[in-house]
Structure formats: C-alpha cells, structure tokens
Image (cartoon, rainbow, N blue to C red):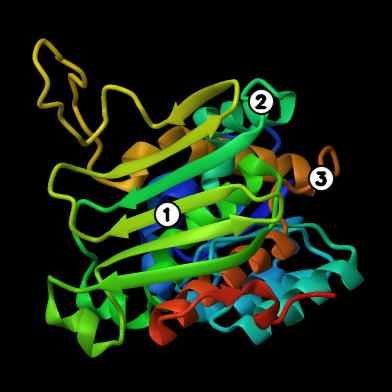
Amino acid sequence: MKVGLAGVGRIGAIHAATLATIDGVDGLVLADVDAAAARRVADELGLDAVADPEALVAAGIDALVIATATPGHAPLLRRGLISGIPTFCEKPVAASLAETLELAALEESSHTPAQIGFQRRFDTGYQRARAAVASGELGTLHAVRATTHDQAPPPAAYIRASGGIFADCNIHDFDIIRFVTGREATAVFATGENKGDPVFTQEGDVDTAAAIITMDDGTLVTVTSTRYNGAGHDIRMELTGSAGAVAVGLDHSLALRSLEDDVDFPTGPQCWSFLERFREAYVKELQAFIDVAAGRAASACTVRDALEATRIAQACDLSRRERRLVDLSEIPGVS
C-alpha cells in the first residue's frame, strides 16, 4: 500500500516515522506547503516527497493521511473522499460547523472511508472503560468526570487560530465521552474564565473552562479544562455507576499529589504533553487506519463522529458566551 502524508510539522513528522514502520505500508510519500521541510523529513526517514499536498493525489496513493495546519484539512479531506481514497485526518475536520456538516454528508454519499484523529479511542484505559460500561459492570451509569489539563498554554499564534478552548482542547473529551458511554449529549451548561495570558481575553477565549453535559439517558457529565496545570499534563476520566466506579489516567504519571498521611502515590514521572500521554495510542490509530484503507476494518472514528463532538463544542461555547443552558437541538446536525 502506498500512503501519502500531507503535513510534516510536529505531529506530521511523528506520523511519518510511525507509518514507515507499519506492516502493509510499502511506500510512503510526504508533502507540505513548505516543500523544503517535506524534503528534509523525507531524507531523514529515507522516503519520497512531492512538491505540495495537492500533488499527493496525483502520486498514485492508496491512502491519504492529513496532518497539515487546520486550513488544509477540509480541502484535502474533500479531495480524498471525492477521489475515492481512504483518508485519515487530524482534528478538526474543518474550521466551521457548516463545512463539517458538508464533509459528513460527503463521507456518507461517497462511500469512501475516513478516520478522524481522536487518538483517545485507541488508548487502552479508555477502551477498558467503554467495555466496563457496555458490559454492565458498573451497573447504571450515573456520573462521568472528564479532565483535560495542559501543563502550559500553546503559543499566542496557535491560540488565535484554535477556535477556542472547547473546540481545541475539550473536543477530545466530547468525543471520548460519546465513545465510552455510547450515548449522545442533549444539553450543556458551560462557563470559563481567564486568569493568565491576556491573549485569551483578546481572542474571546478563556484559559480555564468547565461544562456540565446531560446525556440522552440522564447521565451527568462534568468536563473541565485548563491551559495552566503546573504539575504536568493531566488527562483523566472517572465513571461512577450503581455497581462500581472506574478511572482512566489514574496511574503513577498522574499530575497530582496527595496531602494525606502515608500515601506515596503517584510516584511519577508525570507526563508533560499529549505526545507523552498518548504515544502508544497514536501508533495504534494509524495501524487501525491502514486496516481501514485495506478494507479489513470499518473506521473507528468517522467524520460523523467528529461532527457530533464539534456540535457539543459549539453548544458549550454558545452557553459560555450567553451564560445559559443550551439544548443540542439548537446546533445544526445531520437529520
């Protein structure tokens, strides 16, 4: 199988190195809007490169991986779907809800498989949590707590183009909540504040946020996020049911310390970034995509899945701005 990779920035370069080791990938060609960067990464890995991302489709590829900056996602995903090329795309699918809706419809009508890069679905802990819910091990699920706490904020230029904390940071929580619970959100109430860099306020964003989400079976979900967690990168989920409770991310890398006597947990070291926290998941998601592209498996995370996470993010942002409960029916979706 010949795979084309568009984008050789931080995550793109990591994907290139991973794809080069996956069984079944016989050829890998790279491209970037910065042709010199693509050539440099290709030379380091002993791969081929083409002039620009648009040239990938003409290079006779069997599968496409999109890891460009956000403005490149939608055009390349559209090109892949129309050309009948199985396509992997990092989140977000598009910069707007309207374009995400269009691409979800195109995915369905084209019958071309697409996989969106919500890597938490491939993390062992989250997969075990999903199994615990589905099997009834927890009894009736009553409450879920999801946490995404970054150790430090990204650069100001990234913040300006991020779409806000819910669309950039918590969208991973929104996707994994759907994945683990198997339920859909019906209403949200969200808030947020900024006590850090003024750039957040200048861009209409916040550095810390919280949301309460009601799922369609009555499960209540609490979601929190911050760009300032000095202790380290903290990604967790807790699920409480009538017959038991479980947690994801509760290991010795936990960026939290106990103030109780005789407690030496966690022992560390903590993670400092999402790349450390989900290193194995990033490999597994690309291995899964190659199976999708080869026709051996269905996509584990479709454009439609990305759309539903985006709708929750939009509802949270609307709730924060207007300081009110927002019903998900207010946010356009696929009927």
How crowded pointer 1 is (Cα within 10 Å; few <14, some 14-19, many 20+) is rated as many
Is 113 left or right of 258, judged from the image as shown? right
Q: Nearer the viewer, residue 48 or 56?
A: 56
How crowded pointer 3 is (Cα within 10 Å; few <14, some 14-19, many 20+) is rated as some
Residue 202 x %, y %? 22, 89
Numbered circles on residues, count:
3
266 up-or-down from 143: above or below:
above
- Kind of residue indicated by mark 3: Ala
Of pointers 2 and 1, the one earlier in the residue sequence: 2
Q: Give the residue pinned by disc 1.
A: 223
Query: Which type of secondary structure does the marked residue at label 3 adopt?
Result: loop
Q: CA distance from mark 2 to mark 3?
A: 29 Å
Residue 56 x %, y %? 64, 69
Q: Give the residue pinned by disc 3.
A: 298
Is there a contact, CB below 8 Å, between mark 2 and mark 1?
no
Q: Give the residue pinned by disc 2.
A: 139
204 up-or-down from 142: above or below:
below
